[in-house]
Amino acid sequence: AQSVTQPDIHITVSEGASLELRCNYSYGATPYLFWYVQSPGQGLQLLLKYFSGDTLVQGIKGFEAEFKRSQSSFNLRKPSVHWSDAAEYFCAVGADSGAGSYQLTFGKGTKLSVIP
Amino acid sequence: DTGVSQNPRHKITKRGQNVTFRCDPISEHNRLYWYRQTLGQGPEFLTYFQNEAQLEKSRLLSDRFSAERPKGSFSTLEIQRTEQGDSAMYLCASSLALGYTFGSGTRLTVV
């Protein structure tokens, strides 16, 4: 079964600073990988996804992520954080369960705080 | 707006009561999912529909939970005899294949 680890529960960065959120996954085959963002009391918004091909993936809001198979990682990065980026970020791995469901397994999330 | 719509946004119910949530997916999406998210956790898979057929259910989905998707359009999730442990955000998502679109969720509080 697949699993996702987000080692950092809470990260605080200054506005304008760079950001890297860590994600490690466990899955036997080529994974489908996702990053979602969630504002308080809201649903999840897809930031970016990796299915195959170029291992550096560009997403919305200036985010990017790099798939590193050797490290089983899919870290999320942003060169300059804005106050509006404060939210909770979830990494997820998708797998076809055999019923065609492409079920997602999520990490526990990393809460990002941004200080002025 | 053609996103995934969930109603109600919030529901407070007394322990032992039944509740029902509705999800309206993006119209052309044939796959529909329900997830549950408790405080401080990531979402956990509950069940999956392809068109009107419920093809997969998690072991988290006890016999008090039932989900339907009549005619392959909207879906309902019913919880019977609610317990305090059912308090959570219930998220619906839809897709054509890989990469879901989530709704804003229904926050259930059981008192």
Image (cartoon, coloured by chain):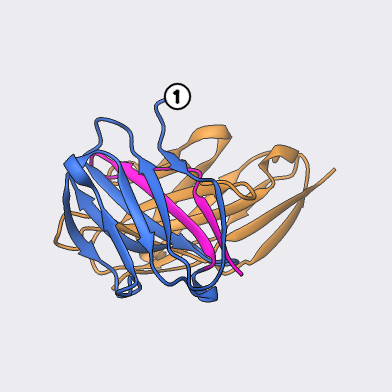
Residue B81 in the magenta stretch? The answer is no
Q: Who's the residue at 21% across and 63% down the image?
A: B56
Is residue A87 shown left or right of residue A35?
right
Do we see residue A102 in this rendering?
Answer: no
> Most extreme residue toward the top, as rendered?
B1
State which quadrant residue A100 falls in.
Answer: bottom left
Q: Who's the residue at 40% across and 37% down the image?
A: B4
Residue B90 in the magenta stretch? The answer is yes
* Residue matched to label 1: B1
Q: For chain A, give the colour.
A: orange
Q: Where in the figure is residue B37, as x and y percent of width and height?
A: 49, 62
> Most extreme residue toward the right, as rendered?
A116
Is residue A98 shown left or right of residue A47?
left
Q: Nearer the viewer, residue A6 or A74?
A: A6
Q: Where in the figure is residue A83, as x and y percent of width and height?
A: 75, 40
Count of all numbered marks drawn on residues in the image = 1
Please give the letter of the chain rendered in blue: B
- The region drawn magenta spans B87-111
Is most of the magenta stretch helix, strand or loop?
Answer: strand
Give the amino acid at mark 1. Asp
Q: Who's the residue at 56% across and 68% down the image?
A: B14
Is residue B3 shown left or right of residue B8?
left
